[in-house]
Amino acid sequence: MSEEPLNESLSRTKVGRLIAEYDLPAEFGARLEARWTGDETERLSLRDLADLFNRRLLEAAMADADVSSVAGEVENLYALLTGDDASAGDRTEAENRLERAGIDVEALREDFVTYQAIRTYLQRRGAEYEQPTDEEQVRKDRDRIRGLRTKTATITEDRIASLRNTGRLDLDEFRVFVDVNVLCESCLTRYSIEELFEQGGCSCRQES
């Protein structure tokens, strides 16, 4: 990881300018680079890095306005300000809270960066990301799907247990199973994710 280069080329980028304007730590740019070029367990995509950077801007603005927050609140406020899933009422409530503290929400939104801005900044730093091999990408996506499956099972189990324990659902001891299957529409063969990834695709494609 390179040292934080203080040069005119970086300062002209939006990310570089905002790091200075929001008085972020001098090594923050190096952290972004490390998370982009790190190994597959540590690496974040450019879009993820843009969200990370924007949340850091929101956190800095709140700290500057003496707005106290509890763990996870910055992430929640950022989701309300930018997410498509937030209701209009929740978004307005979040905006009003920040504006009452003296934060210009519209100006803050204009400072939020896109993944293109992050990419430009990292390229000016001379950062390079080595694309994973085909095998590494398959393994990474397989592990991600497994993680999502485990998360879905855990959330489902918690919700069912909550309904049962409050008398809303009549159920004895239980287990939750979450299976992800893929159907090849050409030959109508069904595979589990593990089977599909391990054999590298559908057998009908390999035979042809």
Image (cartoon, rainbow, N blue to C red):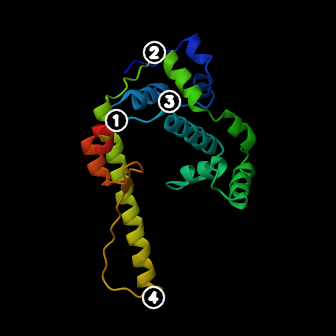
Residue type at the position of mark 2: Gly
Q: Mark 4 points at which residue?
A: 167
Label 4 CA crowd tier, 10 Å (few <14, some 14–19, many 20+): few
C-alpha gap between disc 4 and disc 1: 45 Å
C-alpha gap between disc 3 and disc 2: 20 Å
Label 2 CA crowd tier, 10 Å (few <14, some 14–19, many 20+): few
C-alpha gap between disc 4 and disc 2: 59 Å
Q: Name the residue under label 1.
A: 137
Of labels 3 and 2, the one closer to you: 2
Q: Nearer the viewer, residue 46 or 90?
A: 46
Label 3 CA crowd tier, 10 Å (few <14, some 14–19, many 20+): few
Q: Is residue 155 visible?
A: yes
Residue type at the position of mark 4: Gly
User: Is the Cβ of the residue at disc 3 closer than 8 Å to that at disc 4?
Assistant: no
Label 1 CA crowd tier, 10 Å (few <14, some 14–19, many 20+): few
Q: In which quarter of the image is the C terminus?
A: top left
Q: Which of 145 and 10 is in front in this view?
A: 145
